[in-house]
Amino acid sequence: EPEVTQTPSHQVTQMGQEVILRCVPISNHLYFYWYRQILGQKVEFLVSFYNNEISEKSEIFDDQFSVERPDGSNFTLKIRSTKLEDSAMYFCASSEIGGIYNEQFFGPGTRLTVL
Amino acid sequence: KQEVTQIPAALSVPEGENLVLNCSFTDSAIYNLQWFRQDPGKGLTSLLLIQSSQREQTSGRLNASLDKSSGRSTLYIAASQPGDSATYLCAQPTGANSKLTFGKGITLSVRP
């Protein structure tokens, strides 16, 4: 069964360093998302992406964050200068269709630890 | 601002019990609601997507219902098993881009 994959599963970095989190969405899906979950808190929306551009972003997604679809399969989230408070589980999701009836499928997540 | 609430935060039941997990939402203009399972330290597995035009959606021992008028969805688990122990989250899509707003989840423990 097709699934969303994410690498790495765990990333440890020093504060101020850049990190890139990678995702491979399900192959025929057109809509892509990043969410994060700080330990003990709700899953929060970061950004949605469609047709090679950001379609919506949350207030969390500031200038330190960027997303890219560098080729036909990968979808990346870059954090330019990590802060302690960026430590969280980051989830990539994809859906075949957009709009109000879409079903999103999530990857296993990347645990980011900023020291 | 849209809110999704799941109470209680944790639930412990003996094996074999039928149980109901509740999810409340404030946005009555709901089109669908998605239930997920999350095992500790793991990703989110989609369990059921129930659309507003449906009253119920079933998958195996799971049954989800959606009541727009009361702002509630329930996930019914029949004949619970220890393997059902996990955190169950509900999420509602909003906006043109259908970003999901999540509840905090209910951590279920099924005792053998």
Image (tube, coloured by chain):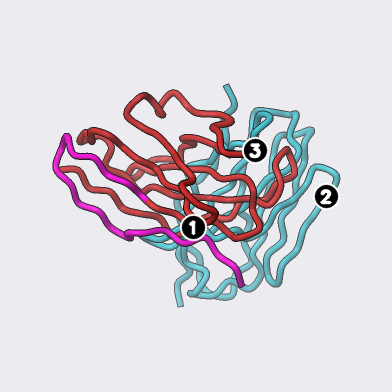
Residue A43 position within the rendered picture, expressed as x and y whole percent measured from the top left: 45, 42
Amino acid type indicated by mark 1: Val
Q: Residue at x 68, y 45 (%)?
A: B33
- The reply to whether the C-beta atoms of the residues labelled 2 and 1 are less than 8 Å apart is no
The answer to whether A57 appears left or right of A41 in the picture is right
**Residue behind mark 1:** A24
Chain assignment, label 2: B
Q: Which residue is mark 3?
A: B93
Residue B110 at x, y = what percent?
Answer: 48, 69
SS for dot 1: strand
Q: Nearer the viewer, mark 2 or mark 3?
A: 3
Near mark 2 (Cα within 10 A), the count class, few <14, some 14-19 or many ≥20, is few
Q: Image quadrant for the N terminus of chain B?
A: top right
**Disc 2 element:** loop
Image: magenta residue range? A1-21
Residue indicated by mark 2 = B55
The mark closer to the camera, 1 or 3, is: 1
Q: Colour of chain A?
A: red
Q: Separation of disc 1 and disc 3 at Cα? A: 22 Å
Res A50 quadrant in image: top right
- Asked if the stretch drawn in magenta spans residue A20, the answer is yes
Spot occupied by residue A80 in the image (x, y as percentages of width and height):
27, 34
Query: Which colour denotes chain B?
Result: cyan
Disc 2 to disc 1, C-alpha distance: 34 Å
Place residue A79 in its image quadrant.
top left
Q: Reply above or below: B60 against A38.
A: below
**Residue drawn at (40%, 34%) of the image:** A66
